[in-house]
Image (cartoon, helix red, strand yellow):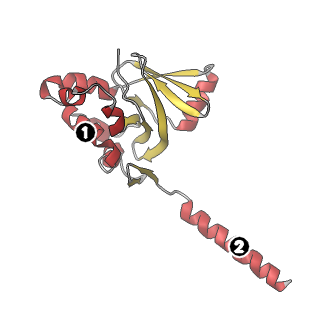
Amino acid sequence: MKTKNVLKQVVFTVILFVGALTYGQTKMMGGAEMYHSKNIIEKAVNSKDHLTLVAGVNAAGLVETLHGKGPFTVFAPTNAAFDKLPKGTVENLLKPENKKMLQGILTYHVAAGKWTAKAIVKAIKKNEGMFTFKTLNGEELTAMMDGKMVKIKDKSGNVATVTIADVMQSNGVIHVIDTVLLPK
């Protein structure tokens, strides 16, 4: 009987220990741990999967904006998402003379407010299967469900899948997506 109680206590202690270790754990994004105390820019620069996005944010002069108080919801395309664009598109957008166009595309990936995956799914269900976000560039994105996956559709007809949700930041949240969203 005594051995049984000791065993129960050991199991309970192990469960508490594991729970304490996993509580508040950071998410991995692009091979880097994403700490809640960092802001969106501080997180993105540490992700090897978002080098193209970071280069674009720098070229567009948006570092200060995304370094700001927020809160922001960023739909962050991976390097692979940018690679799906026609050859030469990224290089062309990074040219100084295309800064305004680049700003328009990148701010199209940002919504005001902190929209967690749970809040997005709830809004989709409440609005009969679709929810529209107003982005920082003034245009809209539409969120919808495909099974259990959240999809984001742009005005050009491109559809991105959220591959990593709820990377919490001090000034908002990042949702990693697999396709670059393009305004009309």
- Assess disc 2: are there few (<14), some (14-19) or many (≥20) residues with their C-alpha within 10 Å of its C-alpha: few
Quarter of the image for the C terminus: give it.
top left
Q: Residue at x 34, y 30 (%)?
A: 84
- Assess disc 1: are there few (<14), some (14-19) or many (≥20) residues with their C-alpha within 10 Å of its C-alpha: some
Q: Residue furthest left?
A: 97
Q: Residue furthest bottom?
A: 2
In this view of the protein, which residue sits in the foreground, 42 or 178? 178
| Mark 2 residue element | helix
Q: Residue at x 43, y 17 (%)?
A: 157
Q: Residue at x 45, y 46 (%)?
A: 168
Disc 1 and disc 2 in contact, CB within 8 angstroms = no
User: Percent from the top left, x then y, of residue 66?
Assistant: 31, 38
Quarter of the rendering containing residue 103: top left
User: Percent from the top left, x then y, of residue 128?
Assistant: 63, 19
Is 124 placed above or below 114 here? above
Quarter of the rendering containing residue 19: bottom right
Q: Callout 2, which amino acid?
A: Val
Q: Residue at x 52, y 38 (%)?
A: 116
What residue did someone put label 2 on? 11
Distance between mark 1 and mark 2 Cα atoms: 48 Å
User: Percent from the top left, x then y, of residue 42?
Assistant: 31, 48
Q: Is residue 149 left or right of residue 29?
A: right
What residue did someone put label 1 on? 63
Give the label on residue 159, or none: none
| Mark 1 residue element | helix
